[in-house]
Image (cartoon, rainbow, N blue to C red):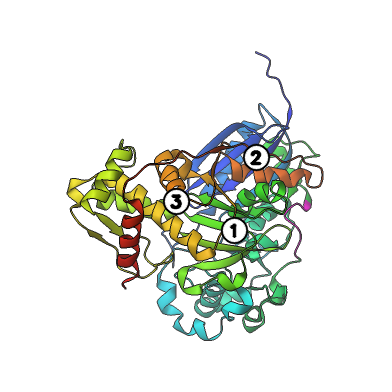
Amino acid sequence: MTIDIKINTLVIDIGKTHVKLHVLDGAFASVFSKQMKNVVELKGGYPSINVTAIWQWLVDGIKDVTKNYTISAISITTHGATAALINSNADNSDGLVLPILDYEYQDITVATAEYVDIRPKFSETYSPDLPGGLNIGRQLYWLKKEFPEQFSSATDILMYPQYWVWRFTGQRHAEITSLGCHTDLWSLKADDYSSLVDTLDCRNLLPPIMPAWFDCGDILPELREELGLNADCRVFNGIHDSNASFLRYRMTQGEAPFTVISTGTWTILMATQVPLENLDANKDMLANIDVTGRPIACARFMGGREFEAVCEQAGSWLGEQFDENDLQKIIEKQVFALPDFSDGSGPFGGRYCEFIGGINQVSGIALATLYCALMIDYQLDMLGAKGKIFIEGAFLKNPVLCAVLNQLREKQEVLLSKDATGTVQGAGYLTTWGDVECSIDVGQANKTSLTALSNYKEQWLEYALAM
């Protein structure tokens, strides 16, 4: 059989839960994909990213891809709050002087109580003090304190997308969407590195900042040959995953205000034309920075993680069937799931999770759906979000959740992305920056007709705020 070989873009998407490869056609639609589960490495001194497993899977996957597709460009997108300390002259293949810390490692919060005294003010970075390793600054502080010899041998600190770019090309760069993702390392006020960078004495370890669409050049020759890639295949600088999803809307909505809700392990609300003064550091609100360097007002919670936790604790499983009638029953019986189900993140981080009412009388997955819709609605209110609301990602698989949100947002239009790979498509656009015609395919969300939903919402809020 003859295979029709066309020129395509390869996107590497490294999320907290899964690692994916996508082959995109000339219109940036995914024509092939595969994925592996991303499992944290628990050996060693602390939980870390299993870069060996990821790299081997990527190599094997790309070798399979190139049997059927000609790849002209590679773009990389990853989750945030992750950085690699490397020695570019090291003999080891991964270049790491220390394993890449898993940002969910909670012990470093207790071990770095003094970090609060050296981190920049929220008004400088718009980066809140987050639990575990969610602030890269705290990670670096802890690693330097606990492993001074290894830390001192580092030649570079690379943000996570750029670490993988370095593995492919040998080129070392930084990029603003990852630097500006609640790291404590970037000052929005000064449009430069924050005071923490100098406090940690690591400015010389941070490579030059280049745009996400910067062409990082050729793949290392021996690697290129092993992968079956052509000599003219280019690798681009890469982007934080939520920003990749946001990019398509930034390119199509002109000057109109809008909010993108990117859903997965994290549910991240990214709103335009919202004053940064609206952000409350105590409610997991922060500013990200888009690929063009503009700040984006954000609010977030671990939506995917919390949805699963509510389901599990309420006796449901993720594939269980339910409908609007199940939600109505929850409202009538006054059963509530109250945050926080994420061990410290989100607008109610630190509050002890609980249920009120007879959870054994209702559908657990319906309760999780109502809970997450109310959390998103609350965060939209906290942001003061205006204009259209676009939902991307995992929660699109739960149309009832989207319909509840549409009922809650009476004055806003709720639209659902029809592109299952919005993050991947956004990353793909970087490979033809300045010469790409961007479009989005969205549809109107359905709307539930739940009786007494607004009263239920008020009661839920009263309980949630009573800490």
For the residue carrying disc 1, how many other residues have a C-alpha within 10 Å: few (<14), some (14-19), or many (20+)? many
293 to the left or right of 40: right
Q: Residue at x 41, y 51 (%)?
A: 373
Residue 191, relative to residue 160: is it above or below?
A: below
The alpha-carbon separation of the residues under discs 1 and 2 comes to: 17 Å
Secondary structure of the residue carrying numbered label 2 = loop
Q: Residue at x 61, y 37 (%)?
A: 22
Secondary structure of the residue carrying numbered label 3 = loop
Secondary structure of the residue carrying numbered label 1 = strand
- According to the picture, the residue beneath numbered tag 2 turns out to be 440
Q: Amino acid at mark 3?
A: Val
Q: Amino acid at mark 1?
A: Ala
| Residue 381 x %, y % | 49, 62
Q: Nearer the viewer, residue 447 or 287?
A: 447
The alpha-carbon separation of the residues under discs 3 and 1 comes to: 31 Å
For the residue carrying disc 2, how many other residues have a C-alpha within 10 Å: few (<14), some (14-19), or many (20+)? some
Label drawn at residue 271: 1
186 to the left or right of 376: right
The stretch in magenta equals 209-215
For marks 3 and 1, the one nearer the N-term is 3
Label drawn at residue 39: 3
